[in-house]
Image (spheres, rainbow, N blue to C red):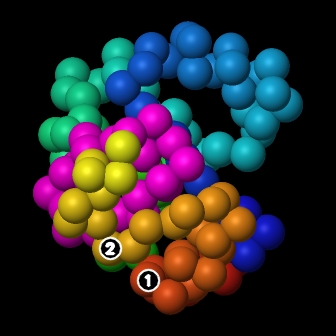
Amino acid sequence: AASGWRLAICTNKPEGATRALLAALGLADRFAAIGAGDTFPVRKPDPAHLRATLAAAGGDAARAGMIGDHRNDVVAAAGLGIPCIFAAWGYGPASMAEGAAAVARTPEEVPALCKRLLAAPATP
């Protein structure tokens, strides 16, 4: 976010639980949109879930990427034609990274990978 990226969450988990967790962590105000498993009529790996989340955040798929830790994230991003950075420290095993544009072994690697893989964010 400090580099100008608009952030959103696309998860298959329920929206209420997602919002409660973000609020408890003090992170709720960092995200332009939350597209949860019960927010739209479709869920990942359907790329329409990611497309709807991007639209809710005011984003553009031509300038977007996905950071995910499950095969559903990689498949949804591929279906939308955007790069996916697989978060190796997350939920899914490394075998789920197949097809990802890159693998981040730690959260600290993500900014550099975003800079390399994604178009620069629009300046306000």
Measured Cα–Cα span from mark 2 to mark 1:
8 Å
Residue at 53% across / 78% down in the picture?
113
According to the picture, the residue beneath numbered tag 2 turns out to be: 101
Q: Which quarter of the figure is the N terminus placed in?
A: bottom right
Q: Amino acid at mark 2?
A: Ala
Give the magenta part as a residue range.
69-92
Q: Which quarter of the figure is the C terminus placed in?
A: bottom right
Mark 1: secondary structure: helix
Residue at 32% across / 73% down in the picture?
101
Crowd band around label 2 with a 10 angstrom C-alpha radius: few (<14), some (14–19), many (20+): some
Sequence-first tag of 2 and 1: 2
Residue at 57% across / 84% down in the picture?
115
59 left or right, relative to 82? right
Mark 2: secondary structure: loop
Residue nearest the viewer, comparing 63 with 85: 85
Residue at 21% across / 22% down in the picture?
41
Q: Tell me if residue 80 is in the magenta stretch.
A: yes
The circle on residue 117 is 1
Q: Amino acid at mark 1?
A: Leu
The image quarter in which residue 91 lies = top left
110 left or right, relative to 98? right
Residue 6 visible in the displayed image: no
**Labels 2 & 1 near each other (Cβ < 8 A):** yes
Q: Tell me if residue 94 is in the magenta stretch.
A: no
82 left or right, relative to 3? left
